[in-house]
Image: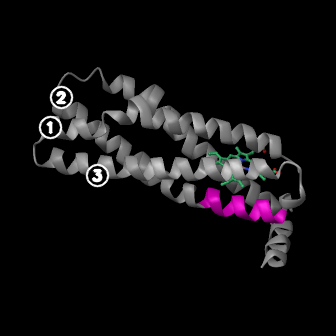
Amino acid sequence: MREWITTFFTDHTTIIVFLHIISAVIWVGGMIAIRIAVHPSLQSIDEPKIKLGKTLQIVDRLFHLVIPFITILILTAILMAVGLGLKHSPLYPIVHVKEGIWTVMTLNFIYMYIKRRRAQKLFNQGELAQAKAQVTKLPNLLLPINIVLGIVAIYLGVVLRGM
Ligand code: HEM
């Protein structure tokens, strides 16, 4: 298996590294855009129902956009870690740190996904206050955590570069 992955990586290095980077760009960049640009401007909507409805809709679209890229990120990460033979590199601990970051980010993402879906159900039933309570932690805590972790993972990618 290791040999097959190494050959596959050597034959397709450019596209694999590209897919890894574009996945990080879309996942981390998408979260930053929603948190910094979209969320504050939604606050200017006075009607609470429209404000919450639009917020849930936008977050839903972002979450479904990033799901395939979260998967591509880990698949390309495995191909790179094995293909570059990083096990024998002094920087191998960084690979484990990045794996840990990916795991925490993905678990956090799944938690936010479930919370948003619960909020949507409550919203559809007209339970506005309860729906809002489900998602208040998203912009204030959970999204910022994933943004910071994503930026750290990108930095560590630069450290690993060309190994
Ligand atoms: C799951 C564990 C991960 C592993 C094992 C891993 C491994 C790597 C490796 C080996 C490189 C260097 C590629 C090269 O030599 O050109 C790299 C680059 C990169 N990684 Fe990861 N990665 C992981 C997760 C992530 C995550 C979660 C993100 C961001 C959300 C990320 C973003 C990047 C970026 C942007 C680069 C490109 C850096 C550059 O070319 O300067 N990685 N990664």
Give the residue type that dot 1 points to.
Leu
Q: Is the residue marked by circle 1 packed among few (<14), some (14-19), or many (20+) residues within 10 Å?
A: some
Residue 16, numbered circle:
none
Give the residue type that dot 3 points to.
Arg
Residue at image mark 3: 117
Identify the magenta region.
72-83
**Rendered image quadrant of residue 53:** top left
Tell me how far mark 3 sits from mark 1, CA to CA.
14 Å
Q: Is the residue marked by circle 2 packed among few (<14), some (14-19), or many (20+) residues within 10 Å?
A: few
Kindly indicate whether the residue at mark 1 contacts the one at mark 2 (C-beta within 8 angstroms): yes
Relative to the observer, which residue lies in front, 33 or 91? 91
Residue 36 magenta-highlighted: no
Magenta span dominant secondary structure: helix
Residue pictured at 80% horizontal, 65% vertical: 82
Kindly indicate whether the residue at mark 2 contacts the one at mark 3 (C-beta within 8 angstroms): no
Q: Nearer the viewer, mark 3 or mark 2?
A: 3
Give the residue type that dot 2 points to.
Pro
* Secondary-structure class at tag 2: helix
* Secondary-structure class at tag 3: helix
* Secondary-structure class at tag 1: helix
Question: Left or right: where does residue 113 sit relative to residue 10?
Answer: left
Residue at image mark 2: 48
